[in-house]
Amino acid sequence: MSSAKKQRASARPVRVLIAKPGLDSHDRGAKVVARALRDAGMEVIYTGLRQTPEQIVETAVQEDVDVIGLSILSGAHMTWVPRVIELMKEKGIFGEVLLLVGGIIPEDDAKALKEMGVDEIFGPGTPTDEIIKYIRDNVRRG
Amino acid sequence: MKVEEIVRGVLRGEKRAIARAISIIEDGLPEAKAILSALEPHTGRAYVIGITGATGAGKSTLIHKLIQAYRRKGLKVGVVAVDPTSPFTGGAFLGDRVRMQDLALDEGVFIRSMATRGSLGGISDATGGAVKVLDAAGFDIILVETVGAGQLDIAVAGIAHTVVLVLAPGLGDDIQAIKAGIMEIADIFVVNMADRPNADRMVVDLMSVLEVSPFNPSDWRPPIVKTVALTGEGIEELVEQIEKHRAYLAKRGMRPSEKKVRTLLLEALRRAVVSDILPMITKSAKFDAAVQMVVKGQVSIDAGAELLLSSIKQALREME
Ligand SMILES: Nc1nc2c(ncn2[C@@H]2O[C@H](COP(=O)(O)OP(=O)(O)O)[C@@H](O)[C@H]2O)c(=O)[nH]1
Ligand SMILES: [Mg+2]
């Protein structure tokens, strides 16, 4: 038993929070990604629609996740994402937790968001394999 | 974060330290032991409530309302919600939080989702450790939501003071089909979704099953509480019944009932037999010999099994 347990421990599943800030009224895309990540062996914490940045960051803290994935379709990324980053800094998880954004983000905004500290941005229709690979390669805690 | 730092943070009730301590225990890291033993002297204050029952019965929704009820009393509430790990991929979808998310920012609430990571019994091996961390961190009430795999969901009785079994009409939750084990560990029965037809029918069925189950006059008699978790109807009564069970336990020095221990011991034994004893038999030369005997038509399968078991039975008889 102990050897099986050790094996399990070393293959610690990556924990990912999938959250939808703002007023988007459906979460199909977020759920598709959530399912793909689960099928890739990750533990996906799902919080449902209409999350405030405060809720998202507090949840990331309590769930001790390795990755926050924000799904934003409303176009309001320039309001939500900077606030999430600010709160991550406040709570001391910025730089430790990967911050990913999914949605339709114009190039200028994408550049600005990355400068602020977003690790990667995935447009709609990005193959989930690409997201999975990115997470595996970049997650900061083993 | 270093061990001492984490321990200090947990004792101060700091959320990040609590979260990290739980992860370390969950991941089975070497520091887990040191953290748990440093926290141990600070545990034993919290009251632990297990919420079990089939998927979709309304456990998470009920927990949401219970958190609110206990918060109104000024108590701090910790939640550990367990969902199954896929045996094929090792991944898990942890969705219980959705129902409680509006409480995420309450300073007096801590919610942690947990995957089973291969553990059986409806909770994970680390759930007990997570409960200890929350206990040491000063949470007065700790709610544990089990996986919802039905009869197997009994391990929570080993870590909870009160076990609430949540049933709901229309889930194929036929009372007759509820297996003995889970019936025996339930201290309180909740018939949720009382807004649906057939809820009363379910209560009556449950009453007739409970009436015929044997009990001693000094035993706790599990009450039945009807709830509508969506609206909060019946929650006050549920809280009252939990209080009553707590008072009953306090009177007997918090010792669990014999019935519960018997059930848990039986299940632990069953698992140990499968994981430890069975392989000893199947890896023996006798097992191969028995296979050959069945292949050649010399004995039936049952007789072959009996052949393998007879010496174990003999040894047990000698032990008596
Ligand atoms: N009609 C009705 N629906 C409920 C009630 N309680 C929960 N639900 C719904 O039942 C579904 C499953 O609830 P959930 O709490 O997730 O169940 P769990 O799987 O046992 O945790 C959700 O859609 C809830 O909104 C209730 O009392 N009445
Ligand atoms: Mg649930």
Image (cartoon, grey):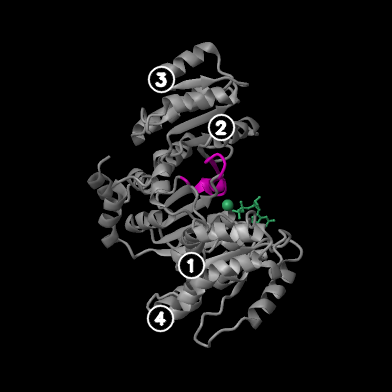
At label 3, counting other C-alpha atoms closer than 10 Å, the crowd grade (few under 14, some 14-19, many 20 or more) is: few
Q: Secondary structure at mark 4?
A: helix
The residue identified by callout 4 is B251
Q: Report the disc number at residue B269.
A: 1
Q: Chain of mark 3?
A: A
Report how far apart the C-alphas of labels 3 and 4 lie in the structure: 59 Å
Q: Amino acid at mark 3?
A: Met
Q: Residue most toward the left?
A: B4
Q: Secondary structure at mark 2?
A: loop
Q: Nearer the viewer, mark 2 or mark 1?
A: 1
Tell me which corner region of the image, top left, top right, bottom left or bottom right, holds residue A116: top left
Q: Nearer the viewer, mark 3 or mark 2?
A: 3
Tag 1 and tag 3 share a subunit: no
Report the side of B110 relative to B183 (left or right): left
Q: From this viewpoint, is residue A121 visible?
A: yes
The residue identified by callout 3 is A116
